[in-house]
Image: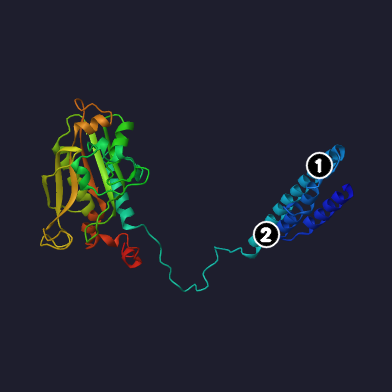
């Protein structure tokens, strides 16, 4: 039996060394070490031997098994390395060479209009002393609702149709959640903005999408008033549109601000005469805003008796539509290259 074991080891070693593929190695492994393999067959007969022979043959069989497995792994590594080197030689491409048709005019890529305007807005606010913050797109109920003064069963939750996840979290419905995370980390006074993607479970039309972009902003300091809010909003709009824009401020309800306002701009698509974007009203809702509610400051660990602030949520898609005269918000995520090439 020991002679048979030596033959199995010698034959396997020779076959492993001669193997030219991973598949060949696997066939050798199955033939020798598989359930019906040569070495396995010997191990199954150990019960017929005397205790002394069983111990001796068993130890030798295990040693041979370890040796064969080691040889297979070593050869497998050699074959893989050889294959990689071969691919590097055969499929190597010099990417610095000119295109075969050197006469062809290549079009340079560029940023999506959403990215372009986001960076522009960030530059405007950082020049006024604001810090740019970020936050997760998959949020908890606490940061998206509760800490923004929207507790469970609050009717305001019905205003924001929400995508919920199976684990009880949600796709953030507004970038206001970034405010709370910022207040937990920062010490007043501070100025922050939080640009990002948000999600609403709603039907789409020329001015509504289920996935769109916002820029949330907040300033916390002593004795903040509506005048501070209006000033910063006017600066933003003038810088973005590079001219004075007709605006109106009307009362609006948002649980996280008090008082709350809707800042509308005169529709730049139709000039105020009425179109599908402004729903024939001549005005486009652009900036829900207001003074930060004391409860929100408390959730952020800030004493409302000492500090106050304003907050706003800018709809970036609608802002870009007004700037460039885009008549349908759905173009932004359409993937239509013809639309993107215009920017």
Please state which of residues 143 and 38 is positioned toward the viewer in this rendering.
38
Residue 58: which disc?
Answer: 1
- Quadrant hosting residue 295: top left
Residue pointed to by mark 2 = 83
- Residue 98 in the image, given as x and y percentages of width and height: 53, 68
Residue located 51% across and 70% down the image: 99
253 left or right, relative to 47: left
Label 1 secondary element: helix
Distance of mark 2 from mark 1, alpha carbons? Answer: 37 Å
Please state which of residues 31 and 26 is positioned toward the viewer in this rendering.
31
Please state which of residues 43 and 72 is positioned toward the viewer in this rendering.
43
- Quadrant hosting residue 254: top left
326 left or right, relative to 258: right
- Residue 141 in the image, given as x and y percentages of width and height: 30, 40
Label 2 secondary element: helix
Q: How is the image coloured?
A: rainbow
Residue located 20% across and 25% down the image: 306
Q: Residues within 10 Å of mark 2 (few under 14, many from 20)?
A: few
Residue located 40% across and 61% down the image: 109
Res. 175 in view: yes
- Residue 299 in the image, given as x and y percentages of width and height: 26, 31
37 left or right, relative to 116: right
Q: Which image quarter holds the C terminus?
A: bottom left
Proximity of marks 2 and 1: CB atoms separated by less than 8 Å: no
In this view, the residue farthest toward the right is 3
Q: Is residue 325 above or below residue 77?
A: below
- Residue 225 in the image, given as x and y percentages of width and height: 15, 35
Which of the two discs, 2 and 1, labels the residue nearer the N terminus? 1
Residue located 67% across and 59% down the image: 83
């Amino acid at each position: 039996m020991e002679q048979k074991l030596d033959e199995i080891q010698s034959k396997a070693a020779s076959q492993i060394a001669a193997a030219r593929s991973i598949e060949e190695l696997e066939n050798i492994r199955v033939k020798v070490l598989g359930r019906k393999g040569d070495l396995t067959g010997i191990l199954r007969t150990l019960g017929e031997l005397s205790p002394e022979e069983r111990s001796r043959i068993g130890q030798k069989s295990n040693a041979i098994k370890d040796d064969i497995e080691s040889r297979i792994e070593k050869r497998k590594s050699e074959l893989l390395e050889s294959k990689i080197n071969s691919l590097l030689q055969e499929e190597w491409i010099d990417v610095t060479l000119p295109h075969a048709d050197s006469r062809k005019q290549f079009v340079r890529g560029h940023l999506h209009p959403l990215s372009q305007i986001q960076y522009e807005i960030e530059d405007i606010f950082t020049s006024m002393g604001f810090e740019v913050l970020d936050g997760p797109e998959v949020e908890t109920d606490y940061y998206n609702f509760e800490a923004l003064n929207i507790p469970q069963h609050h009717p305001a939750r019905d205003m924001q149709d929400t995508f919920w996840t199976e684990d009880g979290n949600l796709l953030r419905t507004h970038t206001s959640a970034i405010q709370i995370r910022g207040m937990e980390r920062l010490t007043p006074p501070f100025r922050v903005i939080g640009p990002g993607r948000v999600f609403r479970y709603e039907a789409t039309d020329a001015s509504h999408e289920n996935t769109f972009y916002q820029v949330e902003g907040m300033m916390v300091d002593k004795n903040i008033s509506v005048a501070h809010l209006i000033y910063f909003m006017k600066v933003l709009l003038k810088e973005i549109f590079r001219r004075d824009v007709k605006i109106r401020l009307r009362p609006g309800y948002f649980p996280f601000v008090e008082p709350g306002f809707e800042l509308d701009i005169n529709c730049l698509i139709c000039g105020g005469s009425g179109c599908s974007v402004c729903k024939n009203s001549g005005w486009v809702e652009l900036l829900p805003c207001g003074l930060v509610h004391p409860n929100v400051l408390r959730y952020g660990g800030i004493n409302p008796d000492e500090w106050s602030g304003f907050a706003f949520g800018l709809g970036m898609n609608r802002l870009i539509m007004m700037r460039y005269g885009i008549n349908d918000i759905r173009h932004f995520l359409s993937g239509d290259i013809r639309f993107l090439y215009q920017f």
